[in-house]
Image: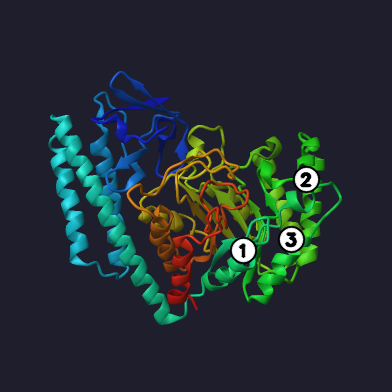
Amino acid sequence: MGQIRFRLHDRDRIATGGLERIYVAGLEEIPWSTRAHWDDDLLVVQRSVSDSGNVYVPWKIDGHGTRVLNTATLMERERPYLLEVELARGLIQRIRNRLFIWEMQGYEVASEFKELLQAATREFALAATSQNEPAEAAVAANRAIVSGLTASENLTAEYAQQSINARQQQTPVSTLMGVSLGEVTPCVEIRRQLVDACNIVQLPISWRSIEQREGKRDWKTTDTQLAWAQKAGLKVAAGPLLRMDDWGMPDWMVLWEGDFDNLANLMLEHVKAVVSRYAGRVHLWHVSSRVNTGKLLGLEEEQRLHLVAQTLNVVRQIDSRTPTVVSFDQPWAEYMACKDDDLAPLHYADALVRADLGVSGFGLEINAGFFPSGSGHRATFELGRLLDRWSIWGLPLMINLSTASAAAADPQARSTSAIELANINTDNPQRDWASAVLPLLLARNTVQVILWNQLTDSKPHEFPHAGLFDAQQQAKPSLTLMRDLRKSCLM
C-alpha cells in the first residue's frame, strides 16, 4: 500500500464529507481502493498500490461551488505536496490539453478566452514558485483554479456552439432529447409542455409496478403512456427492462435471494412478457441499467453480467430490429475507491462488446451532485473527456442525467443522498448546470439520445429536487432551456 501526503492552507476547501470521496487513479482514470485521513496537519491519501497516480478531491471553488478536481500525476515522496498548488497544476494542464485538441480539430478560440487561461497560468506560476510560503502559494493557487475553471467553462461553451453550428451546416441535428416519464402518467398540462420540449420520452416499464403480485401483471399505466406518446408523435425508449438495484424489482422477489437460477428465470420471464407485448411499438429497448453499481439481492459482478447477456439474447430473439442499450451508473466510477468491485463501467462494456451480443449502444447515467449515490460535479470539459473514452467502440451513446434545483429537504425523495448544488451563487443551479452540459452533449455525434432522469418532484421519486417539474407541478427553468434547445438545434 502506498501513500501520498499533502499540506493545505484551508481544510474547509475540501467539501463536506470530502475525505471519503478522495481517491487516486492511474492512466485509465479508474479509481484504486483509497483511504484519506488527517495525520495532525497532513492529509494522507493511502491507496492499494504504490504506482504514481492522480489524486481526485471535491474542492470548494469561489463563485463555482464544489467541483471534483485532480492533481497531475504524483509519485510518492518524503516531502509533502501542497494540495492547492497540485490541484491548480492538474486543472490547468487538462484545460490546455483539451484546448490543444480543439484547435487541432479546427475550432477557433477567441482571444479573451485565451487571455483568461493565460491569467490562470500566471497565477499558477506564482503559486508554484512561492511554495516556501505555503499561505501565499495557496491563495495564488486558488485564484488560478477560479480563473482556470471560468476559462474552461467559457471555452467549452464556445466549442459546443461551434460544433453544433458545424453539424447543422452538414445535416439537421437528429439527437433525441427528452425525459423519463416515471411510474405515474403525467397530467394533461405537463404532457402538453413535454411535447414542446421533447422529441422522445422513456417509459420506465417498472417491474415493481407491473407485477406487484407474482404472476399478476397490470399494463394499464404503460399502455396509457405509450398511447399518448404515439399520438403526440414522440419517439419511445422503453425500460430499463432490468434495473439492477432493489427498487428495480417487486418486493416478493426477495423470497428468491440467494437462488440465482430461479431469480434469473423470473427476471427473464418479465423481459419476455414486456418485449412480446410492445415489440414493434417502441424505438429503443433500454435493456438494463446500473449494471455496475446495483446490488440486486446481493448478485455478484459476474452474475449481473451474465443476466445482462441473457436479457440481450431474449430481446434480440423476440425483436431483432429495435436497437438495444445497456447503461451504467456513476461512469467516473468514484464508488470503486471504497468498494471491493473488480470491474469498472468500461470493463463491463468491453465484455459485452467482445461477447458479440448485439448491443447497439451504451448509456451513461449521470446524477450530478448527489453523494454517495451519484457523481460529483466536475468541470464541463471533463464530460467531453468521458465521452471520448466511451466512443472507442464506435457505438452510439445515450445519456441519462439529472441534478438538484434546491438543497432543502425533499420528503418525496427515496434517496437519502446528500445534495451538492452545481452552484450556490445562483437562483437556478439546475438550469445553469444543464445550460453548460446539454449543448456539449448536442455537439457530439456519438450522443444520440439525451434523457432527463426524473420528471417531477410532486410524486415519489429517487433524487431530491431533480425533476423538471417542482412539487407544485410547475415547470422549472431547465424545461424551458430544453424547449429552446429543441427549437434552435434539433430537426
**Residue at image mark 3:** 221
Q: Identify the residue at image location x=40%, y=30%.
A: 19
Whichever of callouts 2 and 1 sits on the residue coming sooner in the sequence is 2
Q: Quadrant location of the N terminus? A: top left
Give the residue type that dot 3 points to.
Answer: Thr
SS for callout 2:
helix
Q: CA distance from mark 2 to mark 3?
A: 25 Å
Residue 292, image quadrant: top right
Whether residue 321 can be seen here: no
Nearest the viewer among 59 and 360 is: 59
The circle on residue 360 is 1
**Residue at image mark 2:** 264
Nearest the viewer among 480 and 57 is: 480
Q: CA distance from mark 3 to mark 1?
A: 27 Å
Is 361 situated above or below 260?
below
Q: Nearer the viewer, mark 3 or mark 1?
A: 3
SS for callout 1:
loop
Give the residue type that dot 1 points to.
Answer: Ser
In-image side of 396 versus 223 (left or right): left
- Which x, y percent locates residue 93? 27, 49
Q: Nearer the viewer, mark 2 or mark 3?
A: 3
Is 459 situated above or below 128?
below
